Image: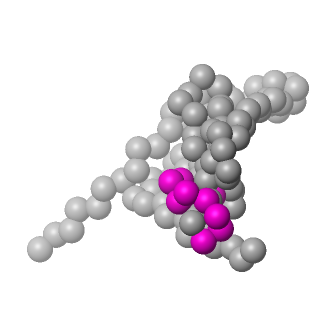
Amino acid sequence: MSTQTQSLDGIDAEALDQLSCNAKADPSTGVKTLKTKTVCESGFRNMTYVRDLDPVLVSEPSQLLGDNSAPNPSEMALAALGSCISVGLLANASHRGVTLSKIEIGLEGDI
């Protein structure tokens, strides 16, 4: 019996290399200003706006006096960190010609 392993779709290695070369040649091209806007709807419910994307709801669980309708700010921070690590792993693997079959990042934090 054979096992077939599915690989993650990589990223455009040539475009990644060009992006890296451009940033090395002129470091100011690598500087990006990121902007978000967070609007409190009521209580601990917040809508966060990023670029022209749909807003992201951030709330609190009921035990922290929220409506339990969305991840809380700390969970969103962990999610952002996990995604950042995953992007970095995939970019570095693609740059080195390594094919990955899975990336899974598990994070936890105590408040």
Q: Quadrant of the N terminus?
A: bottom left
The residue lying furthest to the bottom in this view is 110
As drawn, 40 above or below 31: below
Q: Which residue is drawn at 81% across and 29% down?
A: 33
Q: Quadrant of the C terminus?
A: bottom right
Front-most of 8 and 69? 69
Q: Which colour scheme is used?
A: one colour
- Residue 36: say if magenta: no
User: Residue 16: x and y, percent?
Assistant: 61, 34
User: Residue 41: x and y, percent?
Assistant: 65, 39
Front-most of 96 and 50? 50
Magenta-highlighted residues: 63-72
User: Residue 108: x and y, percent?
Assistant: 63, 73
Q: Can residue 78 be seen in this snapshot?
A: no
Q: Which residue is drawn at 88% across and 26% down?
A: 28
As drawn, 93 above or below 103: above
The residue lying furthest to the left in this view is 1
Q: Main secondary structure of the magenta part?
A: loop
Q: How many marks?
A: 0
> Where on the picture, by quarter, is residue 102?
bottom left
Front-most of 43 and 59? 43
Q: Which residue is drawn at 57% across and 66% down?
A: 62
> Where on the picture, by quarter, is residue 81?
bottom right
User: Residue 20: x and y, percent?
Assistant: 72, 34
Q: Can residue 111 be seen in this snapshot?
A: yes
As drawn, 36 above or below 2: above
| Relative horizontal placement of residue 57, taking residue 109 as reference (left or right) | left
| Relative horizontal placement of residue 6, taking residue 44 as reference (left or right) | left
